[in-house]
Image (cartoon, rainbow, N blue to C red):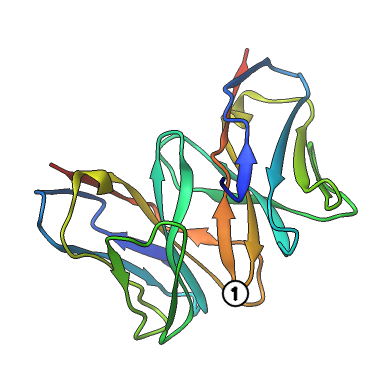
Amino acid sequence: NAGVTQTPKFQVLKTGQSMTLQCAQDMNHEYMSWYRQDPGMGLRLIHYSVGAGITDQGEVPNGYNVSRSTTEDFPLRLLSAAPSQTSVYFCASRSIQAYGYTFGSGTRLTVV
Amino acid sequence: RKEVEQDPGPFNVPEGATVAFNCTYSNSASQSFFWYRQDCRKEPKLLMSVYSSGNEDGRFTAQLNRASQYISLLIRDSKLSDSATYLCSKIQGAQKLVFGQGTRLTINP
């Protein structure tokens, strides 16, 4: 059971480039979320989804897009990367029946 | 103002000591509360849920005070392996899970 898988683990982008951070879970969880973590800021919610086809904005959605075409996948897109988006990104999921979220191991993104 | 506020620390305590963290939250409609633990450069992992009646899991006790809008975590007989960052969090609305800044704890031998 792989749990929540995030790819890539590390990425360096140039300002203005676009990329997609991948997140996949094999636990058939309904809820999925994306967070960024910066020193002194804790985990901040970017976007979340309560099921396939349903997404909503979190605390810091600007500069990021998401879609949820399947239960398993919840990709996060940066359309035009900025240095302010340098961060560690975590994807998380949980089922309706459980309280706790399972997190992926994170993607460390640097924008230069 | 963040929806969940906690003292970032760091807290440095000797092994065997009792340590307590508090966390305040806004929006009294918040539904559920949790403590997560995060080791250095790792992902957060659920430590325990928090109930109004208080709940205990071994050396860990969590408490929720809805009237004053705070949650707490007490660690008794602390171990070196308890060194980590502790994140309080809440769920509200349509499963929107938000976190505080995290409190860094170091247990010293």
Vertical relation: B98 (above or below) A47 = above
Vertical relation: A85 (above or below) A22 = above
Give the side of residue B52 with respect to residue B8, left or right: right
Residue found at the very far front of the displayed protein: B1
Q: Position of residue A62 (x, y in %)?
A: 32, 61
Q: What's the residue at 86%, 51% (across, down)?
A: B67
Q: Find disc 1 in the rendering and name its residue.
A: B94
Kind of residue sitting beneath label 1: Ala
Q: What's the residue at 62%, 23% (across, down)?
A: B80
Residue found at the very far right of the displayed protein: B53
Q: Position of residue A57 (x, y in %)?
A: 44, 68
Q: What's the residue at 72%, 61% (across, down)?
A: B32
Please state which of residues B30 and A91 is positioned toward the viewer in this rendering: B30
Give the side of residue A80 with respect to residue A60, left or right: left
Q: What's the residue at 45%, 48% (across, down)?
A: B43
Q: Where is residue B51 in the image (x, y as percent from the top left)?
A: 82, 56
Name the secondary structure under disc 1.
loop
Q: Where is residue A100 in the image (x, y as percent from the top left)?
A: 62, 61
Give the side of residue B93 with respect to residue B73, left or right: left
- The chain holding disc 1 is B
Number of residue marks: 1
Residue B76 visible in the picture = yes
Residue A3 visible in the picture = no
Mark 1 Cα-neighbour bin, 10 Å: few <14, some 14–19, many ≥20: few
Vertical relation: B19 (above or below) B33 = above
Quarter of the picture containing the N terminus of chain A is bottom left
Vertical relation: A50 (above or below) A14 = below
Quarter of the picture containing the C terminus of chain A is top left
